[in-house]
Amino acid sequence: MFKIFYPDEEAASAYDIPYEALYNNGIRGVIFDVDNTLVPHGMPADDRAKHLFLRLRDIGLETCLLSNNKEPRVSSFAQAVGGSNYIYKGNKPGRKGYERAMEQMGTDTGHTVFVGDQLFTDVFGAKRVGVHSILIRPIHPKEEIQIVLKRFVEAIVLHFYYRHKKRIHQSEERQI
């Protein structure tokens, strides 16, 4: 019932993902949400974000910021991290923003991952277009009211997601 909202995998943070391993497995582009994924909501790019994007370029990965925010927010962040591709007012979870991001990066669904902190915008949009999704924990608890309200419903979906994962894990253990 809720599986369309289930991430393909999870990480504690966008900074904990093994991007080198993703590259070695054929990934060539990473689409990122910005707020509460890379920095707290509304904050500028910090040194950690700048170093991450430098690392990603060194690995050979293309990047694109996909945000529902306005252009000044997204373009300034993209410039601060070294000139990442970006899409503002991305209308997540709509498909077009994800498709445009892949077009900008020169990738397709089989060679792209999406990293974000929200199920109903980030993960759902990635799943709709067929992009591998990585759900990370929000960086900071301060969020806009509409996101705070969505988090209550997300908690229900995450409950079923973790139950589902546990059943799969138990099934795999029985097969061993």
Image: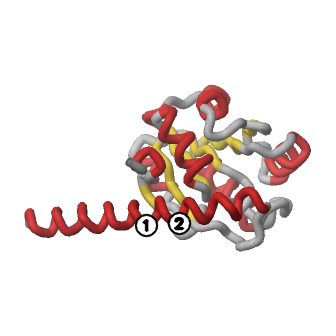
34 or 108, which lies in front? 34
The amino acid on which the numbered mark 1 sits, given as a three-letter code, is His
User: 122 or 59, which lies in front?
Assistant: 122
Q: Residue furthest bottom?
A: 141
Say which residue appears at 32% left-offset and 61% top-offset: 164
**Residues packed near mark 1 inside 10 Å, few (<14), some (14 to 19) or many (20 plus):** few
Q: Does residue 63 sit above or below 151 in this rendering?
A: above
The part of the image, by quadrant, that contains residue 176 is bottom left
* Image coordinates for residue 84, horizontal then vertical, percent: 74, 43
Give the image quarter of residue 36: bottom right
How many other residues sit within 10 Å of disc 2, few (<14), some (14-19) or many (≥20)?
Answer: few
Q: Looking at the image, which residue sits at the far right? A: 72
Name the side, left or right, on which 140 lies relative to 158.
right
Q: Nearer the viewer, residue 24 or 139?
A: 139
In which quadrant of the rendered view does residue 118 lie?
A: bottom right
Local secondary structure at mark 1 = helix
- Mark 2 residue element: helix
Residue 118 visible, this angle: yes
Q: Residue at x 76, y 65 (%)?
A: 143
Residue 83 % position (x, y): 79, 43
Can residue 51 be seen by looking at this rendering? Answer: no
Q: Residue 42: percent from the left, percent from the top?
A: 84, 60
Indicate whether 128 appears above or below 176: above
Give the distance between the C-alpha atoms of the residues marked 1 and 2, in whole angstroms.
6 Å
- The residue that appears at 42% across and 48% down in the rendered structure is 24
Disc 1, disc 2: CB below 8 Å? yes
| Residue, disc 2 | 155
**Residue 159: mark in rendering:** 1
In the displayed structure image, the side of residue 110 where residue 166 appears, left or right: left
Q: Give left or right: position of 115 versus 149.
A: left
